Amino acid sequence: MEILLTGGAGFIGSAVAARLVEAGHGVRVLDALLPAVHPSGRPTVLPEGVEFRQGDVRDRETVERALNGVDAVCHQAAMVGLGLDLDDAPDYVGCNDLGTSVLLAAMARGGVRELVLAGSMVVYGEGSYRCATHGDVAPGPRRPTDLDAGRFEPPCPQCGAPLAPGLVGEEAPADPRNVYAVTKLAQEQLAAAWARACGGRVLSLRYHNVYGPGMPRDTPYAGVASLFRSALARGEAPRVFEDGGQRRDFVHVGDVASANLAALAAVAARPAGSARTYNVGSGSVHTVGEMALALAAAYGGPAPVVTGEYRLGDVRHITADSARLRAELGWRPEVSFAEGMTEFAAAPLRG
Ligand SMILES: NC(=O)c1ccc[n+]([C@@H]2O[C@H](COP(=O)([O-])OP(=O)(O)OC[C@H]3O[C@@H](n4cnc5c(N)ncnc54)[C@H](O)[C@@H]3O)[C@@H](O)[C@H]2O)c1
Ligand SMILES: [Zn+2]
């Protein structure tokens, strides 16, 4: 297959590019090399045989040209992370949603009907919780007064009792809690609308917290694993927010790349006009505090510090159930938490 891979110079995109080339596909990367994630202005080293084009998915003509001769699109380009403040919002909406709609319109005009989209677990907000009395409940955003007082666990919205966090499935209602999360949900909704309107097919992969070699260094746009790894590289202790008990699923970038391969192999067989979502998680739940400890131990110190600070846009616990991806696309994660963190402690970060 000839594949247009947007965002292919990025952390996940470059891992996807490598796997696609290995599998014998033709790969054309379109990436704007956003300065926030590529301060050097140089593309990540891409595997031999990948065609690289620097260009922006918001630019109609660039995208039209990039789609020439393409069978399917793997859309990874996006601004990621929480960002600095609301002044970033127009850029998030522009890159992620305007960019996606420009791409979708060009695909419709150009007759390209197969799309694999990089989605995100952030669309679920707090995810799934159980109250002993009220069963499954969806807690609202946490209040700053609670967070300031160190009450990090969201209580039952009906009785205030403590809740047990669970695994979130794809049918859970979306509840985006920050600008980035809103743009990731809108990308999926735009793609589903595109599929219905032109007989397209889209599979959205909702990645959990991705980590691994090639992760960008710490910026306001980077994930927590990169912030900890960068601190260790400076000889500083990883600073763990809240009490470190936030539950996450850390999934290795190689496993995310193989999920993209599985989705690209499956998308053509889907019914025309359809959209389907898949959670992509390792299936093993860890807390942010555990991740900091594992990384610091593998790096050889210093030990993490739990600070009690918080970020309003963060959720307390969110963990995926990736059974659908395993069952329908035959995907299996291959890198365990222990192996992955040991490798990541020694791996170079990006630029
Ligand atoms: N890293 C994670 O933990 C994680 C989790 C869930 C979802 N995702 C999604 O995975 C995808 C890849 O993320 P990543 O972690 O590799 O981020 P990244 O920043 O390393 O890569 C994104 C790439 O997209 C490019 N890009 C951004 N806006 C663009 C535009 N308008 N036109 C062309 N290129 C543009 C950037 O230059 C960059 O190379 C994103 O869609 C992100 O939302 C990532
Ligand atoms: Zn209750």
Image: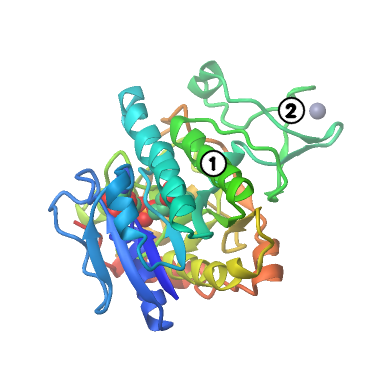
Q: Does any portion of residue 229 appear in the rendered image? A: no
Q: Which residue shows up at 68% across the image and 50% down it? A: 170
| Image side of residue 337 versus residue 102, left or right | right
Q: In front: 140, or 256?
A: 256
Instruction: Give the x, y percent position of residue 159.
Output: 79, 22
* Ligand 2 contact, mark 2 (Cβ < 8 Å): yes
Closer to the camera in the image, 315 or 294: 315
Observer-nearest of 137 and 151: 137
Element under disc 2: loop
**Amino acid tagged 2:** Cys
Determine if residue 323 is in view. yes
Residue at x 28%, y 48% (from the top left corner): 61
The part of the image, by quadrant, that contains residue 162 is: top right
Give the quadrant of residue 349.
Answer: bottom left
What whole-number distance in Å separates the C-alpha atoms at marks 2 and 1?
33 Å
Measured along the vertical axis of the image, is residue 95 above or below residue 302? above
Looking at the picture, how far across and down is residue 65, in whole percent? Answer: 30, 57
The three-letter code of the residue at mark 1 reads Leu
Where is mark 1, residue-wise? 190
Q: Which residue is mark 2?
A: 156
Q: Horizontal placement of 18 versus 43: left or right?
A: right
